[in-house]
Each structure stands twice: as C-alpha cells, then as structure tokens.
Image: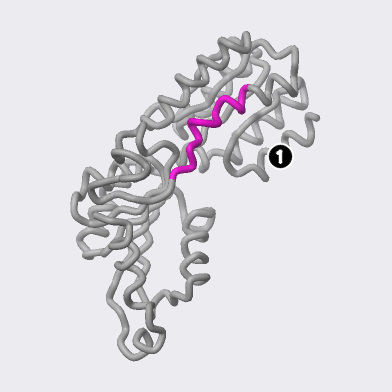
Amino acid sequence: MKRREFLGLVGGAAASPLAAVAQPTTRRIGYVWVGDRETDTRGAGLRQGLADKGYVIGRDLVLEERYAQGNAERIPALIAELLELKVDVLATPGTPITLAARRATSTVPIVMLTGDPVGAGLVASLAHPGANITGLSVLSGDYSAKWLELLKEAVPKLERVAVLWNPDNPQIVRVVENLRQVAQALGLEMAVFPARSTDLEATFAAIANARLGGLVVTDDSSIDLLLPRIVEFAAEQSSARDLPIQHCGSARRVDVVLGRLF
C-alpha cells in the first residue's frame, strides 16, 4: 500500500471542511498504548497533530483509544478489539505494539512510530515499507553509541556501566548489541539488566550492589512507564555516590538527575 493511500484514509473526509460539516464521517483511527491516557504524551501528540491539521475528533473522524494500563500482555486483545470495530487505520507507537498489530492484520493500514523498523523486521526498507505498514522511525539504534560516549565524557574515570532494557523488544536487542561494541571500544565494562515492572526493584538492588558507575536507559515504550521510578532510583544513588544516567526519551525528567550530578 502506498503512503498516499494511508493519507487518504484519514484525509478524505477533512479535505473539504464544508463537506465534513454537511456529512459526518464514520472513519475510525485505532490507537493503542501500553500505559494510561493521563501520562501518554504520544496520544496527546496525535490528538494535537490532528487538531493542527484541521481535523475535529467526533466530526471529521473517530479516534478509538485503548490503554493497557501498564500490562503489555493486554496489547493483542486491545488490538483485536479495535479490529472488531472496523477501524480504518491503526496508530501504533513502539516496536512491540507494532509487531502485535502486524500479527493481527495484514489488511488494515498500520502507521507506526518505532526505533528501527527495518532491523525489527517490520518493513522492507524506509523508502519502500511495503505491505500494510508505514510511519516514522526515530533511528534510536543509530545514535545509541552517543549514550555511552556522553557518559564517558561526563565521567572520564567511568569504568563500569549498567544498561536497562526490555528483552522482549527485538529492536532493543540490536541496540544492546551495538552498545556492547561501543563499550568495548571505550574500555567500559557493561552489565545488562531487564527493566520490567515485576522485577524492577530486584534490578535496582543488583545495580546498587554491583557498584556500577553509570546507567543507560534504552529507548523503549514499556520503560517509559517506569521512568519516574528509574529517575528516583538514580537520585537516591546520587545522594551517596555519583550515578550519571543517560536516556534518549523523556529528557526533562532525566535532566533533573543530571542537574544534581554535574
């Protein structure tokens, strides 16, 4: 499916404002997020972007939003629920959600926001995605090396660093492989820890006991939900010793910790 066809799905009804007022549309956009609506910046951005383009939700289109409330295992069921509603487009932020959507349908267009869609096997190429998927890539895998480089520059004596990641995300698997290569080149010892809500406190205890000198938080939608606690942990550690933290997302929260350290 061509990108022009994707745009037509959501743009047809709003192409003529007068027509949109005279004849309400039944077009539906399905949106799924692993967290909750109140803290979802991506969903807020989608709604604002639609408004900026002149779309009025409820008049020009219907936005069906579903939230997993932090339970990633609910994602397939929420996508199935949206498909039952015959949505015209699925908007999927994050690699795991997009993978679940792709497994659920090969016909409904999927508009994704993900790190490395080619590396995750979602699309054939950025220029020609193919199948029923298109969208945006933030290419976080390409600049992940900078996370370690910045830590080393900020703390020249840094020797050992912890990396928080979601092992269920194939995109992040590739990022961690890249980080290992960069760590070796920088002379850093790197230890990898899972970041899941069920074992986060055990992970923190392991990091604290290992006396690691820095913390890298990989860019993953499920980890975003844990950022407040991660930043709190880093702040706790910084009160006893310097534990610089590097993360590519939600920078304003992490800056609070960085500001206390440097």
Residue 141: say if magenta: yes
**Residue 210 visible in the current orientation:** no
Highlighted magenta segment, given as a residue range: 137-148
Question: With 185 as the anchor, is 96 left or right in this view?
Answer: left
User: What residue does disc 1 label?
Assistant: 255
Residue 117: say if magenta: no
Residue 252 lies, with reference to residue 18, above or below; the image says above
Point out residue 134 in the picture as x, y percentages from the top left corner. Answer: 34, 50
In the image, 179 versus 256, the foreground residue is 179
Residue 47 lies, with reference to residue 256, above or below; the image says below
Point out residue 254 in the picture as x, y percentages from the top left corner. Answer: 67, 38
Residue at 56%, 30% (x, y): give it.
217
Residue at 37%, 39% (x, y): give it.
117
Kindly indicate the quadrant of the structure image that contains residue 95: top left
Point out residue 237 in the picture as x, y percentages from the top left corner. Answer: 70, 25
Residue at 50%, 18% (x, y): give it.
192
In the image, 87 versus 234, the foreground residue is 87
Dominant secondary structure of the magenta stretch? helix
